[in-house]
Structures are given as structure tokens and as C-alpha cells.
Image (cartoon, coloured by chain):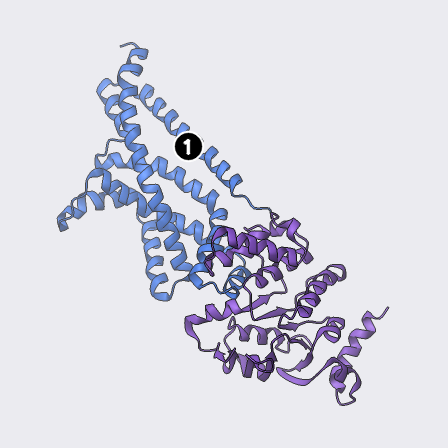
Amino acid sequence: MDTFVFLTTILLPALFDGLIVTLELIATAAPFGLLAGIGVAVGRTYGSRWISLPLRGYVAFIKGCPLLLLLFILYFGLPSIGIRLSPFLASVIGFIFCNSAYNSEYIRGALLSVKEGQMIAAQALGMSRWQSIRYIILPQALRRAIPGMTNEFIYLIKYSSLAFMITAVELTGAGKLVATKYFLFNETFVVIAIVYLFLVTVTTVAANMLEKKFAVPT
Amino acid sequence: MGADKYILRVEDIHKAYGDREVLKGVSFNVRKGETKVFIGPSGTGKSTLLRCINQLTLPDQGRVFLNDEEVTNSGTRINYFRQKIGMVFQNFYLFDHLTAVRNVEVALLKVKKMDAAAAREKALEELRRVGMEDWADHYPAELSGGQAQRVSIARALAMDPDVILFDEPTSALDPELTREVLEVMKNLARQGMTMLVVTHEMGFALSVANEVLFMEHGKVVERGTPAQLLNDPAFTRTKNFIGKFRDYNEE
């Protein structure tokens, strides 16, 4: 078959469907990964022992558990205790666990880097501890965590391909199915790589703009 | 409230860090509109005393009353009292991610729940009061130390506090910048703001204070009006202390 015909009539339409799934996975997981990451970081930094210790355990577990294994547990393991998740939902949950644990480490580092005086001054104005964190400490910390969280977002783009291992046909999976059927591996995988490269590049540019927008003179 | 009634009462404050007793029972009362200045060698508990008043540091013993309401042991109501007890710090502690005007208005919005327009107006008014209105849109990193300290004074003023605590407000500033901050503080004193000031600026202490309290080793050793401290032979230790500064400062 002509390569051009293969690309335009078979590969690209299949990849497009896969790409949509990939984008849905990322768009669903990332916001929760960010919010949960903030929650875990704040809980570990400012919470009592009863909050910070379990969160520490959570992060340690996620860091130590291969993401693929986590997905297997969520998809193949949970049905044995009566919880059946769709491939998409199991993937999203796994990604949120992973993304939030790593994000929380970037944010925690940033929280600790905010000078002590900021909290003192906020409380001296009558802000509660929570208000001080919410309006004074976090806005500064999140700015400093942008580069790290961008990195993590880029990882998310790429490890979203693991969803295929639990049968969610996303970008990589869609390509793999086509490649196997038509025996055109190189053509297929090069195109997929270009798509990932494009996604990562867009992310990097957007993150740079975000960083500039929120930059504060120092 | 009668003019002779006390706006702030501080009773027998004790504070120790481990074995080191920083405050060994400090008491004083403050009338509305008074300026009290705390002087004394470094490390004698002056800053700790101020922080005990608004409970940023919890005293081991002793009580603080604002308008006859107990500030100590007040639970979450401390956030209410802290609105009424402003504080200005040696290192300004302006919020680094906010412009000058937003530094002043953030607590108006989030603590006092004022609406945006009213908070902005109030913030600009306070910046005007300290001569910083033209710098409203600058970030802390773009301000000189003196300017930053004036903004932090505006931030404290905006809450309409009953009393403001100044914790060595000019110690991080060179003489030129010190002067511009002291000028603002003098004006506040003249306008009737109630102020407690920890400082090493003897000129300010002697010209503005209603009462000077000389602290040493966690206690108020001598106290009196500036005139008493200078002229009354009984105040030997204060005079000695001030004398040391004089030797340096007299040109």
C-alpha cells in the first residue's frame, strides 16, 4: 500500500481517535492531580501528625509502586473485592495517584521555601492559619513549583500511554493496533512520537508563558 | 470609654525558652493615644514582649487585656484581637507576591471581608498617609527598605487598629531611610495613634514617647517620662544606656 494512502486514510484517523482518549485522560487526571497534590503538600507541611503521617505514607507508597502495577491493581485486582472500574476510569485514578504524589513533593519543597515572616505577618493581621496559607503562602509556593509541576505534567502526557496496558485505547494503543494489523511499525511509531513531541512542546511553551505571567520581581 | 481608662493592660508576662527566662514578669498599662517606647540592651526580651501581646508568641504566664477583653487564652478570637493590634516588623515582612497596594488591602478583603472597591480606596488612602501612594503598583522587591517599611505601616493602619506594635522598625535601615520611617511614626503619634515601640532610636524615644521603659534581663528596670529619665538622678541605668548611644551619635 502507498505510504501516503496508509497515513491519511488509516493511520491518522485511528491516531486521532486515540489522541482524543489521551487528551481526555490527561485533562481529567491533571486538575485532580494538582488539587490533590496541593492538599497532600499542605497537609504534610502544616497538618498535625495525624494528618501528615498518613500522607507521608501515601506519597512513599505511590513513589515506590510502579505505575503499571498500580493500574493492574486498580483494573484487574479491584473486581475481586467487587469494585469494577472501566479501563478509562482505572487509568485516570491511577494517574491522579501518581501525579498528586509527585506534585505534592514539588509543592512541599516550595512551601518550605517561603520565608517564615510571611506567615507571621499574615497572622499578625488577623488571618487564621488557613487564610494565611490560602492567600499568602500558597500563591508564593505555587509560583515556585511551576517548573517542577510542568515536568510532572509532561510525564503525565507520556505515562498516559500505560492506559493501553489495561485496554484503554489511547494514542499509543491505537497506533499499536494499526501497526500490528498492517505490519508498518516504523511509519506508525514515528508519527506517534511526533504527536507526543508536539504535546510536550505545547506544554513547555504554555508553562513558560504561565511562569512569565505570574512572575514577581525579586 | 473615659480618657483615663486603659486601652491595653499587660499583666505580669513571663516567657522562658528552655532554661532561659526571657521575660520575668512585665506589666504596664497603656492609655489611648499614648506612645510607649521600650529601650534597653539587645536580648532583653523587648521583641518577645511585643509578640506576647498579640500572641504570636504565647507567654508562659500573665495576661493581656484590650479594652478590658482578655487577649490571652482567647482561642480563635485571637484573630479578632490581632486585627485590633497592628504590628510592624524589623524586616517589614511585606507579602512578596503582592504589590504595595495589594499588601495593604489583602487583609481588608480576606479578613474584614470588605468589597473590592472600598478596600482599594482604603488601601490607597493609607498609602497616601505614609507618602507611598505613587508606589502602589510596585512589588516589595522594587522598594527601598524605608519605602517597604512605610508600606508595612500602611498595612497595619488599614485595619484601624486600637494600638500598633513596632518591633525595631528601623533597625534594618540606614540613617537616611530611618529618618523617613521615624517621620511617619512621629506623625502617627501626633495624630493620636496608640503605639508601643521597641527601638534603639534614642532621639525618637525622647522626643515622642509619653513614657520610656528601660528593660534589662527580662524586666522593666526603670520607667518614666523622657524628662524624668534625662533629669532625675535616680534613673542611672537608663542614662548610662542612653549615654552610650549619645557618644556614638553626637556629631
Give the residue type that dot 1 points to.
Val
Residue at image location 65% in from the left, 59% down from the top:
B129
- List x then y, in percent, for residue A134: 44, 55
Give the residue drawn at x 68%, y 80%: B211
Residue A50 x, y percent position in the rendering: 33, 65
The structure residue drawn at horizontal position 56% and vertical position 46%, both measured from the top left corner, is A216
Circle 1 residues within 10 Å: few <14, some 14–19, many ≥20? some
Question: Visible in this render: residue B5?
Answer: yes
* Element assignment for label 1: helix
Q: Which chain is purple?
A: B
| For residue A133, side relative to residue A64 (left or right) | right
Above or below, comparing residue A40 to residue B243 in the picture: above
Q: Which residue is mark 1?
A: A200
Q: Nearer the viewer, residue A165 or A82?
A: A82
- In percent of width and height, residue B115 lies at 47, 54
Which chain does tag 1 point to? A
Asked if residue B246 is positioned above or below residue B101 in the image, the reply reads below
Report whether residue B96 is seen.
no
Which chain is rendered blue in the image?
A
